[in-house]
Image: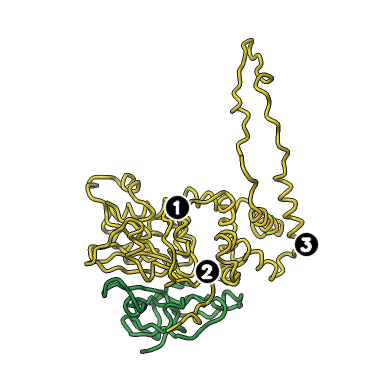
Amino acid sequence: MLELDYRSKAMDTKFKINDEITVDSRSSTGHCRTPAYIRGKKGVIERICGRYPNPEEIALCKKDPKIVTLYRCRFKQMDVWDNYSGKDSDTIELEIYEHWLNDV
Amino acid sequence: MDKNYLKMGPHDVGGEESLPIDTTDNNMTHWEKYANALRIVVSSKRIITLDELRYHTEALGDQYFEIGYFERNCLSLHNICIQKGIYDTELFQKIKSKKISEFDVPIVDLPDVASINHIHDGKPHLHNMSDFQEDESGDGPPDYYFDTLAIAQIFIDQGLITNDDITLKIEQFDNVFPNRGKAVVAKAWHDNLFKEALVKDAKKAISDIGIELETFADIICMPQTDTVHHIVVCTLCSCYPRTLLGMPPSWYKSRSYRSRVVHEPREVLAEFGTIVPESKEIKVHDSNADMRYLILPPRPSNTEGLSEIELSKLVARDYLVGVRLPK
């Protein structure tokens, strides 16, 4: 598995850089890398990171975990927190797997 | 809207209100280094994956914040081994008792000074009591150390790992990994072309200068600029480019840091003594999946003419996480 070039960007992806997205707001059980605070929030694709095995399946020891596209997404802090005390231009960036992202 | 129902578990702390951060790094005891090395060896050999370990750590429920970071690692590793049938409780207890007995040495009565001064080469030879002091004091090792030693011994007996694997990993974490990030940053300060390559594709640039990071995670380098201040956190656990920077400091793994940086970065930075002007954007990076981050600090002033080696001595770990800036 380690031999795979996870970082390869040469592929068709559902989302492109600067596309607007929302993070899905469903709840989850088991191991998952999408923090609660970012679910349901609107942002944009910052970059495409590559294709990685789905950690939700690795955690359950699935034999051939699905390979999924990972994106870095940028959010305005003002859009993430109700009472954000910082500046309008402050941002936060997270890595979100494709199956947690929706079109706007 | 109350979104608490989305919280995945005790570990999912991003956005919580929390206490001020203890910004001193409390370092690690030997047992913690041993536990860390075992975890890394086991996961890098893919005997048990990091995601399995995380999953079982998260499943500790209320215990998660009642015990320490390495205690959580040890307990989740043990729970996985039992669940997967790598060993059973009986074997574990047997090996653990043996490990405890290895530490159970009789306390030696320290000799009386008068009785141990003797004639040596025809002259009186005087000893100080300090020559006979035991080099350990206080309580014995914590119970989790015996657990960890027992788990490691079973893996060794099964031929899955060796003692040398663990020893090597402890040495790398002490002496090799922490220096890599410093060397990379010093080179970027010294060599503009390397800096450009580093920002473009950090993992490749680092590999091109002969540093193999032995990790499948990608590395992203974010340069601090006059207009943007970068800071890194992992709200879900403690993701950190360990083979580039060494072990994360204790505050990086703390509940306070993980909870607060995402929603009040300016306040957190101020606790580290870093005042970011209102005119600057703060960009928080939640290192929550497969990327790891290296923040490239600006080169300190008045360092013209310094060599890479001299520059590397000016690189502090805290710069590379973004909590402090060079003067």
Q: Which residue is mark 1?
A: B25
Picture mark count: 3
Q: Which residue is mark 3?
A: B90
The chain letter under disc 1 is B
Q: Secondary structure at mark 3?
A: helix
* Mark toward the start of the polypeptide (1 vs 3): 1
Q: What sort of colour scheme is used for the picture?
A: by chain
Give the residue type at disc 3.
Glu
Q: CA distance from mark 1 to mark 3?
A: 38 Å
Q: Where residue B22 sits: x, y (%)?
A: 43, 56
Tell me which chain appears yellow.
Answer: B
**What hue does chain A carry in this figure?**
green
Q: Secondary structure at mark 1?
A: loop
The chain letter under disc 3 is B
The quadrant the N terminus of chain B occupies is bottom left
Q: CA distance from mark 2 to mark 3?
A: 35 Å
